[in-house]
Amino acid sequence: MTDFEKTESSPPSHAALPYAPRNRWKPDVIRQGDAIVKDYGRRSLLVRAFGRLCLRWEEAALRRLEGIEGIPAFLGRPTPDSLKMGAVPGEPLAKRKRGELSEAFLRNLATLFDLMHQRGVAHGDAHKRNILADGERPYLVDFSTAYVRGRLPLLDEYVFRCFVSLDLERLYKVEKSLFGTGNPPKMFLLYRLIKGLK
């Protein structure tokens, strides 16, 4: 939900669409009461194919994480091009400034990542638009690129560890930007090489 910016005005035929996609590879995000629907149905054939893959990955992650507070509940696949999940409260960290969150929030966020990793899921894209804060309670959203253990049997352990490293690096960046503290995790070789080229 937070990967989209609110539209000033929407065409009448899409009045139920409160968020506009940031680019053509993103789905429409529709609020339906206490639920959120991500829908690629209005996209091109190529983007819909990509979207179905992302929705399948998100479904697998949400099912694996069922019952963990701070993770949206999976509510179904209304169509092959859409996924329905429970709406979660909170505001994206991208809108928060240093000093606005407590250290308890950071501890709870670290615990949420730990619980997720114990279940065999790594988010991999937990930037500040995908982490929400509701008081001291963190929420993670947008699992469309998450890695679920078992997806790549021959490379599973290595890929999972790489995704976990990405999560820990994001956690460090949150701590650094909002609290001015933290120690960066040791990242995997490919990540260090790419960063070295920038």
Image (cartoon, helix red, strand yellow):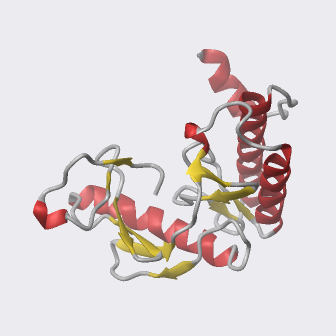
Query: Which of the two residues, 127 or 99, is positioned nearer the viewer here?
Result: 99
Instruction: Tell me: 133 left or right of 112.
Output: left
Res 186 → quadrant: top right
Give the percent coordinates (x, y) of residue 120.
76, 66
Give the percent coordinates (x, y) of residue 169.
75, 38
Residue occupying the point 44% across, 76% down: 84
How many callouts does the rendering have?
0
Query: Which of the two residues, 195 or 72, is positioned nearer the viewer here?
Result: 72
Instruction: Tell me: 42 left or right of 198.
Output: left
Residue occupying the point 31% across, 59% down: 18
Q: Is 13 drawn above or below residue 192 in the view shown?
A: below
Res 93 → quadrant: top right
Q: Is 160 drawn above or below residue 151 in the view shown?
A: above
Instruction: Tell me: 10 left or right of 71.
Output: left
Residue occupying the point 49% across, 71% down: 56
Instruction: Tell me: 57 left or right of 65.
Output: left
